[in-house]
Amino acid sequence: MTRERRSILLAVALVLVLVLAACQAPAAPQASQPAQEEQPAAEEAQPAEEGGENVLEIFSWWTNPGEADGLAALFEIYRQRHPDVEIINATVAGGAGTDAKAVLKTRMLGGDPPDSFQVHGGQELLANWVVTDYMEPITFLYEEEGWLDKFPQALLDMVTYEGELYSVIVNVHRGNVLWYNTAIFQENGLEPPRTFDDFFQVAEALQAAGITPLAMGGKDRFEVAHLYEDVLLGALGPDGYQGLWDGSVAWTSDEVRAATELFSRMLDYTNPDYSAVSWAEAAGMVADGKAAMNIMGDWAAGYFINTGRTLGEEIGYVPSPGSEGSFMVVNDSFGLPKGAPHRENAINWLRVVGSREGQEAFNPKKGSICARIDCDPDVFGAYHQFSMDDFASNALVPSAVHGSAAPDAFAATVLLDATLNFVVDRDIDLLLETLQQAAEETYLGQ
Amino acid sequence: MARTTALPRIRAASRRWDWERIIPILMISPSIIAIAIFVYGFIGWTGYVSMTKWNTLLPDYTWVGLENYRRIFQDVRFQADIRNTVVFTVVFIAGCLALGLTLAILLDQRIRGENTLRSIYLFPMALSLIVTGTIWRWIFFPGNYPADPSGINLILAKVGLEGLQWGWITDPTIWPGSRPEWLKVKLLVPLALLPMTLAAIWQMSGFTMAMYLAGLRGIPDELKEAARVDGASEWQIFRLIELPLLRPITLSAVIILGHFSLKVFDLVMAMTGGGPAFATDMPGVNMYYTVFQGNAFAKGSAIAMIMLILVALLIVPYLYSNRQEEM
């Protein structure tokens, strides 16, 4: 009897524990609505929460050689300035951050933000996190550090919402670059194309010589849309391209239709196995002489260098057809989430990220250029000096595929899906109507 | 041990309250509560979300009815997903059953080394689908054929069968390729889907074989002996005795393979990424991108509910027939 009693008690206790656990879950702090008031509380709770440790948790998707080295260089500077803080490097692997962003969304919505996280400056930051009230403005930091005239205004505009700045841009990649195999071009007596007419002439000659003219990827889903956005920039010019995002140019307009026809013609010169080729493999086709050209952002520069090529010798580069004078900005930035568990440490982290010292340490390793305009060109190689010159003088436009020009609901799904579908069915009406409809639903009139 | 002494105690207990009946209920109640919340509760929650306007990061529970369903069914990608799921499921299940049954019958001949062979056939199942997908992607990666083929195209070139080279997982052809007026995608079989189906069959046919082998071993020899005495041929024994007796096995295999195929995700991600033009895309992949890249939680939930309905279409008749048999 007594043993039976005890087992009953045990069972009841188990049930109670479970019920209690179930009750507690919903009571956990809801994402962040009253975050402003919550912050002091969160700070007070900090020592107890982390067992009295002084911690900084940085979330990013920089795991590959080069970018991980750059991140380590930033951490090193932070450690020198704040030796007592332990840094937690919370990375989630995967190019373009697809998987990392999924993890980040789960954490943010669950009320468990990291101290600071990597985010493409632009709509990915603003639409996802700022408009939804998950971020704290950091205009005060720009004023304290005197950064307001150290970054190009076009770049600051990308991270500004209702007059407040929301993140610190650490690096800039260029999206509109055409890479070519110089040996192939010399053997066939060709010049790198500057305009669309040039491109089609060159492509025709290469195809006649039995060489795949344009290497394109597709396995990572973004490559086709990346080419499309570079063609749109080349055909519409910087103002027309910007018009797509502010609503002054409709996707169904004649100019966009003409640009899309150019895009469709260019696709005729690509490799048929694109759908199983990643962007790096497509760049590799150019490096190995299996294809003549590749249009990709300048993270491909890092790939070429890592595989032992010298930029300007084996591999040449020019702005993608028609886009000379424009600079497609792809950037990474860090911001300050509301309710960051270690707010002071996070702010100090942002000071490092925005400093000239930090940017000069990070960018040569990452293979990008500084977002600041006062970095020393001598710490960079020849390609990046060319890129810095253009960055200082060209029209800066935001990339949609890489998170700046349009919100994820448009750029990360509809735009990618519709262009991938277009490669096969080539239905211009379907593509443009899909994009126009999605634009109206996601970012126009908001 | 309790049996002999239980009688007087039960009588005593039933007078107060039937503890012998309450304890089992108490013991399973934690798991019942957990399942109620974490399975059925979340299914209900997903169903609710799928009828709201929550298509940004910020929750918005405005009721919109079936609007999200209407939109996903008009979506090219989702239409392709449904087509692919049907084709993949049918080819995959048929392939696994045929191959699994053949292997099981061959192994059932009491041959030497049966254990080793059985393990070899079962082994692919132990692999992660990511590994399977990556390896089969290497095999079916066409390369720049005919000039610079790779994978299976390279083998074909080496043995002088260049004529058989084609794009495999990168070929966008849909066979036969007609498009009904009310659809945005062509029907019916995307050729790029077939290599992926083959990889899945390779992975799961050993498992089907093991199920069939167990079934065959469960058929009493007396039945077959009696049939032989009556003059039945081996083919007749197989067709009229073994096959009917294997029906429950087939049904179980169809359920297991069917729900595997309806949920397939990692194989697509590793092998093709869904391309070309969604010829190999699946609802699970679409749902992942819709929710975690596009932040369209309501639309993603609608896709999840459609997947649930597809699985239910397969499983509910099975559970129902099981119940009928039990009663």
Image (spheres, coloured by chain):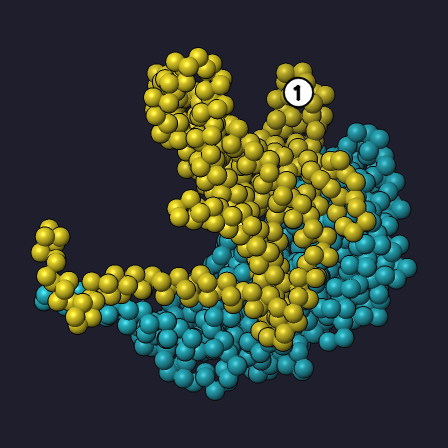
Chain colours: A cyan, B yellow
Answer with the quarter of the image where residue B232 lies.
top left
Decide: is B192 above or below B25. Answer: above
* Amino acid identity at mark 1: Ala
Decide: is A142 above or below A212. Answer: below
Relative side of A387 to B44, left or right? right
| Residue ID at (58%, 44%) | B268
Residue indicated by mark 1: B157
In the rendered image, is residue B173 in sight? no
Taking depth in this image into account, of A127 and A144 the one nearest to the observer is: A127
Number of marks: 1
| Residue ID at (66%, 78%) | A161
Answer with the quarter of the image where residue A306 lies.
top right
| Residue ID at (63%, 24%) | B154
| Residue ID at (54%, 65%) | B46
Taking depth in this image into account, of B36 and A175 the one nearest to the observer is: B36
Image quadrant in which the C terminus of chain A is located: bottom right
Q: Count residues near mark 1 (Cα–Cα under 10 Å), then give few for <14, some for 14-19, many for 20+.
A: some
In the rendered image, is residue A420 in sight? yes
Relative side of A281 to B245, left or right? right
Give how far across and how far down residue A39 sits, in percent: 45, 83
Give how far across and how far down residue A200 sits, in percent: 86, 42
Taking depth in this image into account, of A381 and A26 the one nearest to the observer is: A26
Relative side of B197 to A50, left or right? right
Give how far across and how far down residue B198 sits, in percent: 57, 33
Image quadrant in which the N terminus of chain A is located: bottom left
Decide: is B326 above or below A21. Answer: above
Disc 1: host chain: B
Give how far across and how far down residue B53 sits, in percent: 64, 71
Residue at the extreme front of the image, as rendered: B230
Relative side of A344 to B165, left or right? left
What secondary structure is marked by label 1? helix
